[in-house]
Structures are given as structure tokens and as C-alpha cells.
Amino acid sequence: MTMQTPVPARTRVTPPPAPAGLADMQLPITMMRDILLKTCFRKSLSTLTEMAESTCLPRNVVQELIDLCREQKLMEAMGTLHAGAGNEMAFQLTDAGKSRTQDALAQSEYYGAMPVPLEVYRQQIKRQSIRDIQLTRKQLTDAMGHLVLPQDLLSNLGPAVSSGRSILMYGPPGNGKSSISNGIRDAMGDKIYVPLAIEYAGQVITVYDPIVHSKAEAEAQDPNSLRRKKGFDTRYVRCDRPTVITGGELTLDMLDLTYNATARTYQAPLQLKATGGIFIVDDLGRQQEPPQSLVNRWIVPLEESKDILALQSGEKFEVPFDTLVVFSTNFHPNKIFDQAALRRIFYKIKIDGPDQKNFLKIFSLVAKKKGMPLAEDALVHLLHRKYPSIDNIYANYQPVFLIDQMISICDFEGIPYQMTPELIDRAWANMFLKDEDIVK
């Protein structure tokens, strides 16, 4: 068995090559022709340049499609040059072309970017697999430098992230599990290519989602370089590795294809949009679905690196599953999963609250950032009078909470920012409620 050598994070991912001609497209010729006709009709296009930009195809490929449409009497040259487009020849749909376009629209409203065949997309996923990333301690530390973390946490987290396998983070609430998840995303730092849409069995599935995918700036060409960078297949968008974050709203049907009955197209589920990136299931145990059911849905993807999706017709098909799944919960794993489910989650990392030393470090950093002067008598009051009442259990969220409360009080009272035992007491009263019965 050949061992695959991991590449360091931020190494340039090999871009998808642009199709050299119509034969390279690997799509049904009728489908490509109809998408071109629908795009011309819906967007009132008439020139080769406009068609190439709208379908995200090289000009020579579009020219082949135009020639095909002309042979089939679906499109004709207008006989005049288009003055507003560099004196290009203009084209228009014939009556037969308009009729064919209406029939095509009745079957599917999809137009615009030509989809990428699923089999072609599989090849690109391999070129940019998240499992090929090898994060270093420095990269992870730099991404989480703003967090005060236990010394051994990065030692446990680093190998887990580099594996590209599943991670379960658990521990008391308010100790930075969500911030750590975001830090993992920031540590990756490189770019991948996300298809605007993919095709399977003649069906179009839209993948690119501007809410999930952050489009990267175009790479500038070096004018002094003897070698010019080749363009990539523009049916893809160059993006940061995606991060999908879900919480209590996650339901099982969000992990299935979504069918648009009007447009007769599909939208990719969340985990497919997260391909090549991270899928974070935050607040596991707060969803309507039992945690065991959610993890059961992930068993095949986590073990076999593939997912099973279904079309409206009931036909099932496989898609690659190349995603780092991070589960985060405030519950002990033994209380929400059986051992079979836990066995399928490769790394279990407990995120505890800070000790007193780290709590004071966080408190000082937050106070400095927010312009709140520290006062020794107030800190002594906080540590010796307030925390003993909760068994000296510290949490990462508490410094921000307490200092924000004191700032709000100072703003309301019209006094300079200050830290006093009295203000500590008032802030503390909003952080913890007294256990008491409500008189009805």
C-alpha cells in the first residue's frame, strides 16, 4: 500500500484544468446545448464573449456549441457586428431555437454556469483533500494566539486536525469550544476550488453558496515572470477552505439534497458544501434530533469517506466525503452516545475551564482590551469571596461577562471605568441566579 505524503498547510492546491474542447466536458451534448440556449434566452445574450462569461466556459468550447446550434437551425448569425462588444459577430435564436428553449425550460429552469460532472469533481477533491494537510504546531498556535489554552490542548488537537478525521470536543459550557473550532479553520489558511454546480445523471446540483464559501481574491500575475500562470476551469470558484457551522437548528433533513420543484434543480446539502473544509456541529445534544441519530447519519461518511444522497426519483448515488467533522457538546459523551458511536469518532478531546492562573491571565487581557483598569481589592474580593461560592469553578467566558457588566454600569452611572468590590457584586448577580422558588 502506497503511503501518501501530506503536504504542509498553505501549499498551493492544483487548480482544475480548463476543458480543452467540447469532448473534454464529459456532459451530455443535449444538456450543454440546452443550457446555452436557456442562458442566451434568459440573459438576452448575443455574442460569444457574453456566452462564454455566463456559462463559465472557454471561448473555443462555446464556439463549438454555437456551431452545433447553427447546424441544428437553433441559432443564426445576425449578419452584423455587435458594436458594443468589440465588433463581435452577433447571434440570435431562431424560431426553432426559441421553441426548443421553452421545452428545455419546462424540464429545468437551470441556466448559467455549465455544471461539472460529478466524476470530474471527484478528481478535483483528491487534488485538494483536507486529509493532505499537515498542520504544524506553529500554524495552530498562530491561529489561536488570541486564546489562553491549557498547555497540552494543542498537543492533542494538532494530530486530530492533521488527520482530517472526526473530532469530539466536550466539556463545561463557556470554555471556548466554538472559538477553538474557528481557530482550526483559520489555521488551514489555503485555498481550494468549489464548483458552482455539479451534474449527476442529467440532474444539476448547485454547490457554491456565498453564505458558506468565501471567495478569494484573484491571484495577481507577476509581470517579470517568464512563465504565466495558466487559467483554471472557471466553473469553479477559488475559495478559502469552507466552514459550515450548525447548532441547535440542525435536523437530519438538512443533510439531504434539497429539491426546488419550480426550477427542477437540487441544492447540495450542508456536508457537500463543506467538502474540503470543516463541518462544525456545535451544541450537540440541543437539537430536536437525538445526538445518537445525528451520529448514526455520519457513520458511513466517517468510516468510508463517502456519502449517500438520493434524487427525487429515489435513485441513490455516492458523493465523496472529504470533510473534517468537529462535534462540540456540553454533555459527557457517555450520556449521549453508545460505545459503537463513540468508536467511530476518532478523537475525543476534553475542553476544561481555566485554572486560577489562566483565569487571571484572561481577565487581565480582557480588561486591557476594553480599557478597564484593574484593582487589587476588587480582584481579591472576586477570587476570595465570590468564586468560593461556586466551588472555584472558572470558565473562559466569565472575564468578558463580568467586565462588560461593569462597563455598562459605569456608562449608566456616568462615572469613569473602574473596578470595585461593589461593581463586582452587581456584575456577579447577573452571571448567576440564586436558586429560589417563585411565589405564584
Image: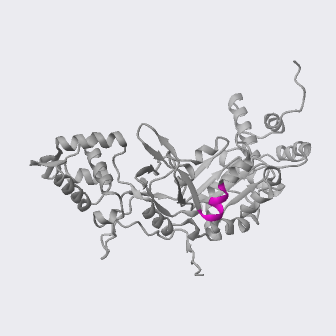
Can you give x and y, in whole percent of width and height, for residue 127 in the image?
A: 48, 69
Can you give x and y, in whole percent of width and height, for residue 275 in the image?
A: 54, 58
Q: Quadrant of the C terminus?
A: top right
Q: Quadrant of the N terminus?
A: bottom right
Please tell me which residue is depicted at 45% across the width and 51% down the height of the picture: 208
- Residue 207 visible to an observer of this rendering: yes
322 horizontally vs 329: left or right? left
Residue at the far left: name it.
79
Q: Quadrant of residue 264?
A: top left
Can you give x and y, in whole percent of width and height, for residue 390 in the image?
A: 89, 44
Can you give x and y, in whole percent of width and height, for residue 338 in the image?
A: 80, 55
Q: Main secondary structure of the magenta part?
A: helix
- Residue 176 visible to an observer of this rendering: no
Residue at the far bottom: name it.
1
158 horizontally vs 61: left or right? right
Q: Which residue is more in the foreground, 203 or 398? A: 203
Q: Quadrant of residue 180?
A: bottom right
Q: Quadrant of residue 425?
A: top right
Q: Which residue is more in the foreground, 340 or 365? A: 340
Report the label total. Answer: 0
Please tell me which residue is depicted at 68% across the width and 69% down the height of the picture: 159
Please tell me which residue is depicted at 58% across the width and 51% down the height of the picture: 244
Q: Which residues are the magenta region?
A: 298-305
Q: Is residue 15 found inside the magenta-colored segment of the image?
A: no
In this picture, is 317 found above or below 431? Answer: below
Q: Is residue 299 found inside the magenta-colored segment of the image?
A: yes
